[in-house]
Amino acid sequence: MSAVTIRDVARRAAVSVASASRALNNHASVTPATRQRVIEAARALDYVPHLGARSLSRGRSNTIGVVLPDLFGEFFSEIIRGIDYAAHRRGLQLLLSNMHGSADETELAIRAMRGRVDGLLVMSPQVDAEFLGRNLPKGLPAIVMNAAASDGTHPTIAIDNLAGAREAVAHLVAQGCTRIAHITGPEGNADADARRAGFRTAMIELLGAGASVEIEGDFSEASGIEAAWKILGQNPRVDGVFAANDMMAVACMATLAEDGMRAPDDVAIIGFDGVPIAQYVTPALSTMALNLAELGERALEKLVAITESEEKVEATTEMLKPELVIRASSRRRHA
Amino acid sequence: MSAVTIRDVARRAAVSVASASRALNNHASVTPATRQRVIEAARALDYVPHLGARSLSRGRSNTIGVVLPDLFGEFFSEIIRGIDYAAHRRGLQLLLSNMHGSADETELAIRAMRGRVDGLLVMSPQVDAEFLGRNLPKGLPAIVMNAAASDGTHPTIAIDNLAGAREAVAHLVAQGCTRIAHITGPEGNADADARRAGFRTAMIELLGAGASVEIEGDFSEASGIEAAWKILGQNPRVDGVFAANDMMAVACMATLAEDGMRAPDDVAIIGFDGVPIAQYVTPALSTMALNLAELGERALEKLVAITESEEKVEATTEMLKPELVIRASSRRRHA
DNA sequence: GCGGCGCGTGTAACCGTTTCCACGCACCTC
DNA sequence: GAGGTGCGTGGAAACGGTTACACGCGCCGC
């Protein structure tokens, strides 16, 4: 064990633990001579402070808990990267927890954070706000990312899925599509549900009820491939596809192409999220791009702001607007 | 504050804190009646144990520290996913730290883990083993992932870059390439250096010294694009490209194609890492595929094994072999 | 009937820090 | 020269749990 404690340092420097602590933490009232002795002793013993103990006594851990539904794919890794970037700048550490999409695990994960973090970043598209409100520890600052409508108890930062879906549909229509399929995300996922809702209202507005097809997906590559099979089996075929995320769009596009149904001429395709992969496929995928790293960054900044301000902040909801990025997969030469 | 402590629970249940603790932790010697009262009190007060305090007194945190050089891209996110998967299965939490490639930060990051984790997973292609050996806390179990040659003090799990690079070159040669460029990773990065070394020896063996070109890169998309420009400006041109990672291969391939130099006919291209994106670009990218999630998983399992075994384990080195995945980008019709 | 055993419980020490408070000392001021 | 002031220091109490140890009690076996 690197079991050298501050007591060992104090003993070697012939001072009390109190003075040792003060010297090591740059407190004002320590003689330069004392400080010097303590620091030398610490170096000689290769002392590293026990941060667990420190946070217990300071009541502050300099750690932020991050609870995510999953870690798969670029969606989450971009968010983590944004969080990490902002956390690093502020000297905070990250305690990561993955609840694998289950509500029980979410509760567990959140409880497991108690006493180890100063604040919580929870992303939870699968469980409703009421559940979160009930389970988030009372005194712990928390930001809810991207959940179903906030219950008003915690500040939220969310994606404007509704507007994004409308814009995606409008874009396809502008390219001349008259019959559009939506590959949905998993039911019960807040993002997926909102994107589907946006798709429906936009379709009714722009093309009427008969022109839309919904194909169940679950955000996975596999479900994008299956969706392509369904599309290929239909008659009449669709001439536009709006997938609820980029991964499904990419997989669907590739599968369609194998059977000769090519984007953008036979079918215009657009995804959602704007993950890096979208720009490297051929044809490059149009998408409703989100700056996910920025989402993570902003969430962390907001959390820090709460943590530091004394008065309680009201539960505002901040929206992240997706941006239409038109690439080859949906660009028609003669629209 | 959710400041309800075990003392509050004990008071409400009219028992001592010792009994409360025992009841809540399923210790054997507690009367069912007592246990019942304690559990009810805990529920009534919405008690959540303070895990920081627990780990201090138990001397065990159920947390693993993960120190990575960066979080950008699929390479690291796949590794984290693998680590998380294995950690989750064992009920461990992850404390994440990113040292942004700097040695100072590495030292800081490692020190910041003291007293908060039971073990350390360090991935550090940029700093040498000697540095790590000096900085890893003495008593803390640690696994070094993918560093420059182990100093023999810590178990290591690494990528067989040398063999991978040779195999990549051999594959290109088998496809008929006679002049091959290697887009390198950043100098000083252990993976990059090993891949370059493998490239050199394989080239000398198979095609002789004159047939190889080295282009400096740094694993980034931008450097892949720049490499393409250099390739296009050369005379005679190469007919094979081995990039030190997939990201550069993808970017290079796309840029070459814009100028009419197409894979696989004009140039056969192969990358390294086997990140998911490689299979979606067109033409699909051949690569020396690594199962990065498995790498993370195995590292965590190994760490747990060390943590749990009493006798000290010797510092073995485990190798992860890349697997040649041939896709369209390097498949010549008439080899 | 008495000693011993086992079981459930409580008291208190401990984990490694930080920090409140008290204390002693030198210095300054009137 | 006495009394206040301020500064550096040390003792000890936190922080919130776990657990070694002691203790009292009822039961069993001789």
Image (cartoon, coloured by chain):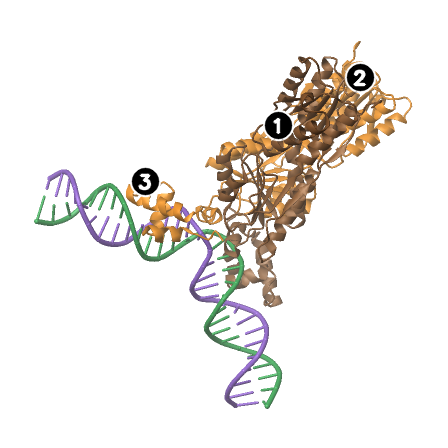
Chain colours: A brown, B orange, C green, D purple
Tell if the residue under mark 3 belongs to the same chain as the one under mark 1: no
- Residue B27 visible in this rendered orientation of the protein: yes
Local secondary structure at mark 3: loop
Per the model, the C-alpha gap separating discs 2 and 1 is 36 Å
The residue that appears at 35% across and 52% down in the rendered structure is B12
The residue that appears at 52% across and 50% down in the rendered structure is A52
Q: Which mark is residue A185?
A: 1
User: Closer to the camera, B8 or B326?
Assistant: B8
Q: Position of residue B81 (x, y in %)?
A: 60, 32
Question: Viewed as shown, does residue A48 lie left or right of B285?
Answer: left
Circle 2 residue: B264
User: Closer to the camera, B263 or A216?
Assistant: A216
User: Identity of the amino acid at label 2?
Assistant: Pro
Q: Which mark is residue B28?
A: 3
Q: Position of residue B262 (x, y in %)?
A: 83, 19
Q: Earlier in the sequence, mark 2 or mark 3?
A: 3
Tell if the residue under mark 2 belongs to the same chain as the one under mark 3: yes
User: Closer to the camera, B190 or A254?
Assistant: A254
Q: Position of residue B74 (x, y in %)?
A: 67, 31
- Residue B147 visible in this rendered orientation of the protein: no
Q: Residues within 10 Å of mark 2 (few under 14, many from 20)?
A: many
User: Identity of the amino acid at label 1?
Assistant: Gly
